[in-house]
Amino acid sequence: MVSMGHLLNDMFQAVIPSIYPMIKESLGLSFMQIGAITLTNQLTSSLLQPMVGYYSDKHPRPYGLALGMCFTLTGLLLLSWANSFMAVLLAVAFVGVGSSVLHPESSKVARLASGGAKGMAQSIFQIGGNIGRALGPVAVALIVVPHGQGSISWFGLLAVVAIWLLSRIGVWYKKQLERYGRAQSKFDIENKSSLSRHQLTIALLVLLVLMFSKDFYTANIQNYITFYMIEKFGLSVSASQYVLFAFLVSTAVGLLIGGEVGDRYGRKYVIWVSILGSSPFALLLPYCGLTWTIILAILVGMVMSSAMSAILVYATELLPGNVGMISGAFFGLSFGLGGIGSAIFGWLADLTSIQYVFQLTAFLPLLGIVTYFLPNIRD
């Protein structure tokens, strides 16, 4: 259920980058303004998520999930009516606030339901989001492209369904709080870290570099691959949306694989393979024809996405008992880095070209080499 809630939330989020070609033309926006829209959406969620997570660790609010989705519903309705750049910014900010509530609280629910398989539980939860992000471009191609920006309001009906679903999760969550107290899983109550403060600092800095590498590269693909396919290969807007769909589906598959492998063989191994292992595909992608560009985009999405659940569970093992804060911080960091990357790449694309941006960002996965400095922990 929490994965389905994540699916609906992130499908609404995915509507935003999917309509970029449409609003860029209708509102006369630059690539820099497109990047600013992404930055606004992702910063509203990234700045709030750690605070929401920290507060919910101390004072869990089971029905806060449904309340957060009300903000998303408001944002979708505003986006369907937005006729200026500032109105779009306001709309995407509301959607970002809704996301800031869902991620840390839902991540805690997933851990509570994990039965000890924390990596797989995180993967199942996150797969909902990946599938939602994959469905967003398809929904835009089928609904918004032929019927116009106003049809975004139709997604409001699904948002109402999401509010009901999250309220049902709140009922279950409340029962778990009454049973265990403060939303700490019985598998996660006193798992103290044996690392020194210096080791913790090094580990967190390495995770920051890895998140930078993964999220900057993914932001470029997710937000600009439609423009890349249109500019380089002459695809239509609708056809480019299906390429984005294929990339996002591949990230969902990779996420599931990463969770299972991490539970069996360790998080550090998954992080090694996922970040650094995606670099050959990323380096080749800007120099291939249409077919191989699509294939390599799918491969790099599948390999790189397997890191997210491993990184998140690894981080919660570094600082046990702070699942909400850690989840909020890392999801927020992911969104924030993605927003910053999108704005930078939009500015760079205005100065140069989309193709040059893809060639430059292909080197980012090589930063996966810093995984060597992560300490080995019991996970």
Image: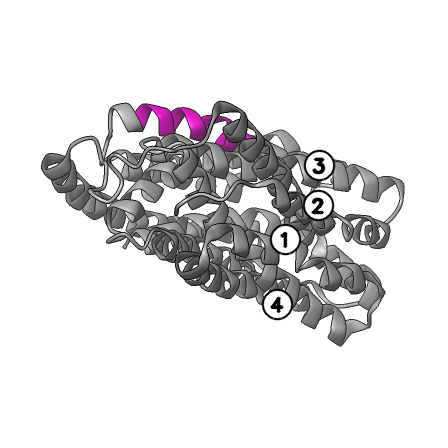
Dot 4: within a 10 Å radius of its alpha carbon, few (fewer than 14), some, or many (20 or more) residues? some
Judge from the rendering whether residue 76 lies leftward or rightward of residue 85; answer left or right: left
Amino acid bearing label 3 = Ala
Spot occupied by residue 202 in the image (x, y as percentages of width and height): 58, 31
| Rendered image: mark on residue 343 | 3
Q: Are marks 3 and 1 in contact (CB under 8 Å)?
A: no
Mark in the foreground, 2 or 3: 2
Q: Which residues are magenta?
A: 43-56
Earlier-in-chain disc, 3 versus 1: 1
Does the magenta portion include 52? yes
Judge from the rendering whether residue 299 lies leftward or rightward of residue 193; answer left or right: right
Does the magenta portion include 325? no
Q: Are marks 2 and 4 in contact (CB under 8 Å)?
A: no
Q: Are marks 1 and 2 in contact (CB under 8 Å)?
A: yes
Q: For numbered disc 2, what is the local secondary structure?
A: helix
Vertical order, 130 against 346 (above or below): below
Spot occupied by residue 157 in the image (x, y as percentages of width and height): 35, 52
Q: Are marks 2 and 3 in contact (CB under 8 Å)?
A: no
Q: CA distance from mark 2 to mark 3?
A: 21 Å
| Rendered image: mark on residue 242 | 4
| Rendered image: mark on residue 367 | 2
Judge from the rendering whether residue 50 lies leftward or rightward of residue 356; answer left or right: left
Q: Is residue 163 visible?
A: no
Earlier-in-chain disc, 2 versus 3: 3
Mark in the foreground, 2 or 4: 2
Amino acid bearing label 2 = Leu
Dot 1: within a 10 Å radius of its alpha carbon, few (fewer than 14), some, or many (20 or more) residues? many
Amino acid bearing label 4 = Tyr
Q: Which residue is mark 1?
A: 275
Q: For numbered disc 3, what is the local secondary structure?
A: helix
Mark in the foreground, 3 or 4: 3
